[in-house]
Image (cartoon, coloured by chain):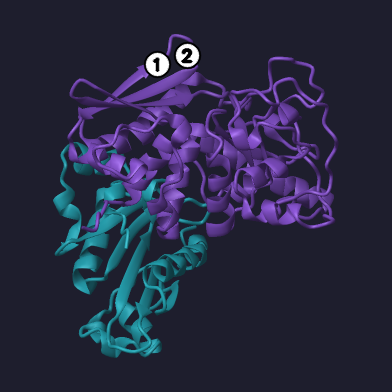
Chain colours: A purple, B cyan
Amino acid sequence: MKVVDYLDHDVAYLLGLIVGRGEMAIREENFYLVLPFRFVSPDLAGLDQFSGFVAGVAGQVMVRLQRLLGLHVGFDISDSQQEVRLTIRLPRDHLVVRNILLILAGNPHASPPHYSDLEVPRLIQEADADLKKEFLRGFADISGNIRPSNRDRTGFHRVYLDVLNSNWKLPVQICALLQDSLEIPVANILWGHPNLRDPQASDKHGGLREHQIRIYAHRFLPLGFYIDHKQQALKRLAEENHRLMEERRSRDPARRCPGYSARRSTKDPHPMEKSDRLPEPVRRHFDAYWEICAAMGCPYAQRALTQPSFPGGEDVEED
Amino acid sequence: MEKDLYSDIAGWLRRFLRERHKGWQVLAEDTSRISLGEFLGRHRLNQRLKWAEILDIKVDVAGVAWPKSGAEICLAIVEVKKGPIRLRDLSQALGYSRVAQPTYAFLISPAGWSGNIDRLIRHFRRVDVLEYDKGRYLVIARWDKESKQVRPGDALLSNLFPAW
């Protein structure tokens, strides 16, 4: 029997939210999905209020999910005023639950996958560009942030899509979706690996932080955020990038990552680089971000590793 | 000015049609100064739509997709407003849509839509008023000036945004 699952723009957006940061569980006869939206202050005048962020999540995301799922969408704000959570509760055998599990786990009656095992669903990888974009907008709404401190060393602003450290498969998959399918260049990925996050090995127990997929703000506009608060910050900083290019008469800093960079500054050995908390493919020493991309399946980086020399570019580590 | 948006909107409409009708011929342009009938006639597509010659209505932007072989045609119309879309605008766009019966019909504004439209469609759930042909709905949406597109999630009802 051929298994057919349902996908439209709203479902693609929901899948992006789930893969971005969703926590799923089945308790008794109910399926629970928690979607935490962390507030990252953009440090921009008029956009620093948590209330504006809350209004964005309620007005854009919650309303859309309510239309998709009925009124089973709960809303609460953390005591710390740093997070808004949407909670969806549905009967475990609900058609929506079966559809989500079929798409994410390959079986409508499977246990919900843990965040660390979530991947870009094959259904999305094979979908039309419009649906891929909606998936990525969901992903960005829940996991993305933009603020002036995300800028590169030359001052150009970037969006960061954060992937929690426990999931090592997603960054390369999201990068491929952006670059290969939608022609949105990814500047680089700062992996949450001790060699990149703590290159001087100054913190003996640290270095296992989130992975950051970095995209120049002006090149992220074709996707954008639906949460208005983030979108306003994006527009301002994308404009700033255009202004900088004009002022300096410089070329667009955004270029498609070819899977390598020329510089491989040698990193100090780190006590955590062989930690059991790292998955086997990256439980070793690395000197460049793209070596990790190769270890995690990027075909361009894998090809580059077999080549004797690499043309221009710059390595990336903790700014 | 509304007219300043037409060229970008025509560009977006071409992309929209290309994605949904792969391998078909596609065109879209500012049609605010000519009637829909003239637009189809100029491109020798009037034979493909029975009532093309009587379409003396002017929409802001129109697009068409058609196969290289075969007599089908897919018409798309876009009405553009500068300020928030009001009930009066909705009535006008619905009228055009009912007459022309395009495959896709959009009513868009960079300023979104008014509170009354929101209440009518979302609160009172009068989705029926958007249906201009059997199973075809007028899409009310916000035009994103920066990225020059209509995003599905920026539609008043995202589920009515044509997926295919």
What label sits on residue A77 in the rendered view? Answer: 1
Q: Quadrant of the C terminus of chain A?
A: top right
Q: Amino acid at mark 1?
A: Ile
**Horizontal and vertical percent position of residue A9:** 34, 50
Q: Secondary structure at mark 1?
A: strand
Residue for badge 2 = A81
Q: Are marks 1 and 2 in contact (CB under 8 Å)?
A: yes
Q: Amino acid at mark 2?
A: Gln
Q: Quadrant of the N terminus of chain A?
A: bottom left
In the rendered image, is residue A91 in sight?
yes
Tell me which residue sits at (28%, 36%) in the image.
A110
Tell me which residue sits at (45%, 35%) in the image.
A117
Say left or right for A167 vs B162.
Answer: right
**Horizontal and vertical percent position of residue B155:** 34, 49
What label sits on residue B32 in the rendered view? Answer: none
Q: Chain of mark 1?
A: A
